[in-house]
Image (tube, rainbow, N blue to C red):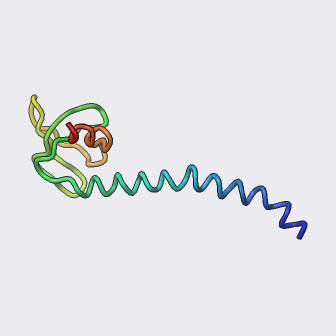
């Protein structure tokens, strides 16, 4: 019984870290993956570097976006979920 009491603070600390740090990060990563999978031609997006554009072509891991200065080929992971969502609300 005394051994369990010695490890109890470590177990509680791990549980707190899991629920306040690890789990939210996993949830956000899952949402970003779903966002990338749901992209379609014609969606207006903003990249993580701040480039605004409209999707003109989709591939497995890359996209082609149309900007005011021409077309750019980028990785799907370079699209910002938060900034693109705020653009869609406008």
Residue 70 rendering spot, x and y as whole percentages:
9, 33
Assign the C terminus to one quadrant of the image: top left
Q: Relative to 26, is 13 on the left or the right?
A: right
Residue at the right extreme of this rendering:
2
- Residue 61 vs residue 22: left or right? left
Quadrant hosting residue 74: top left
Q: Pick the residue in front: 55 or 11.
A: 11
Name the residue nearer the viewer: 35 or 71.
Answer: 35
Figure quadrant of the N terminus: bottom right
Which residue shows up at 10% across the image and 30% down it? 68
Q: Position of residue 4 (x, y in %)?
A: 83, 67
Camera-side residue of 63 and 8: 8
* Image quadrant in which you'd find residue 82: top left
Residue located 22% across and 40% down the image: 89
Exactly how many numbered labels are in the figure?
0
User: Where residue 10 sits in the image (x, y, percent)?
Assistant: 75, 56
Residue drawn at (30%, 41%), measured in percent from left and top?
80
Rendering coords of residue 78 (x, y %): 29, 42
Q: Is residue 57 above or below residue 54?
A: below
User: What's the residue at 48%, 51% (across, down)?
Assistant: 25
């Amino acid at each position: 019984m005394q051994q369990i009491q010695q490890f109890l603070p470590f177990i509680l600390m791990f549980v707190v870290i899991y629920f306040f740090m690890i789990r939210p990060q996993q949830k956000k990563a899952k949402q970003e993956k779903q966002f990338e999978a749901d992209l379609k031609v014609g969606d207006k997006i903003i990249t993580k570097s701040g480039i605004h554009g409209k999707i003109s072509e989709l591939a497995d891991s890359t996209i082609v976006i149309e900007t005011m200065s021409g077309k750019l080929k980028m990785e799907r992971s370079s699209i910002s979920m938060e900034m693109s969502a705020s653009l869609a609300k406008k």
